[in-house]
Amino acid sequence: MGGGSQGISAHRHRTRGFYVDHVLDSVTRAVFFTFFTNGSDDLGDFAHSIYNIEVSITTITVCMFFPFIALGASASAAIERHRTAAERDALTGLLNRRGFLPPSEKEANANALRGSVVVCDIDYFKRVNDTYGHGAGDRVLQGLANEMKRLFEALGRVARYGGEEFAAFLPDASLPETLALAELLRVSFANTWGEEGLEQGVTISCGVSSVRDGETTLDGAIDRADSALYAAKSAGRNKVVADEAQSSKTGTSCYPTVLQAS
């Protein structure tokens, strides 16, 4: 996004430079022909003078190129707006799946792909929509998005991965660190909804996995985090579970349920 904005800014800078050059050219010509040449004051002589021909050509050139310059600037701005819209979720403002994966992998590849992935899913989300309406469901989605921004966005990238599923990639975080952050997210999110009038409460389940040595994409880590998420759901929901193979190395695999899932 930043690259597109810089491109538009550079284009505008070149456009301003184009017009400044022509203004200076016109002023220089006027001064030269007024004070340093012996010319006739007759209008007919001026009409056929080299100066008049050059000014006319310059004016026609500027008029020909101006529409193309303006069109180019508008097209650049439109392309940037559409690219941003294509990579963002309209409801939450987070990246969508398309915007999440390639940049995450590109950033990580600069320092060898490493880090951890969190995949979260809202428990019984359909029941929220059925009981309280889709407006309440939207507020729940936005609430989880805001909590993930608060906890994860300074450390990596956050996305609404699809439906009620969210994901985060933390390039410099270990598995235990990411597991602890996911647990903090689980608790802080669950504590929100009593104040919002959702009497049954809303919880999330999370799966956590790390990128393994030699992996060049996030696909494997996301798949393992998805499996851990499924394990959290199977264990009763409202849990954070780590990838089993990796958690055996760290000695931490699952945070116990603190708030009873409804």
Image (cartoon, rainbow, N blue to C red):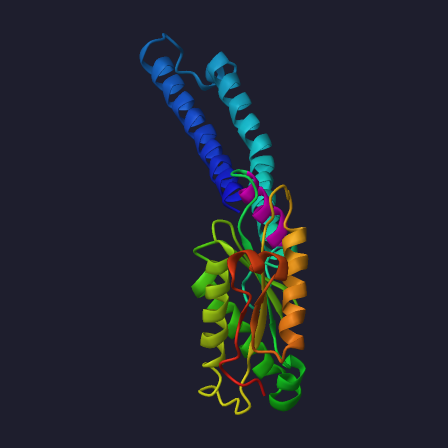
* Quarter of the view holding residue 31: top left
* In the depicted structure, whether residue 131 falls above or below residue 2: below
Residue numbers of the magenta segment:
99-109
- Residue 47 seen by the camera: no
In the image, residue 102 lies in the stretch drawn in magenta: yes
> Percent x, y for residue 242?
58, 64
Query: Image check: 216 left or right of 46?
Result: right
Pick whichever, 252 or 137, lies toward us. 252
Residue at image location 53% in from the left, 47% down from the top? 1
Pick whichever, 76 or 141, lies toward us. 141
> Percent x, y for residue 143?
50, 74
Pick whichever, 111 or 160, lies toward us. 111
Residue at image location 47% in from the left, 15% down from the top? 51
Residue at image location 44% in from the left, 87% down from the top? 195
Q: Main secondary structure of the magenta part?
A: helix
> Percent x, y for residue 229?
63, 68
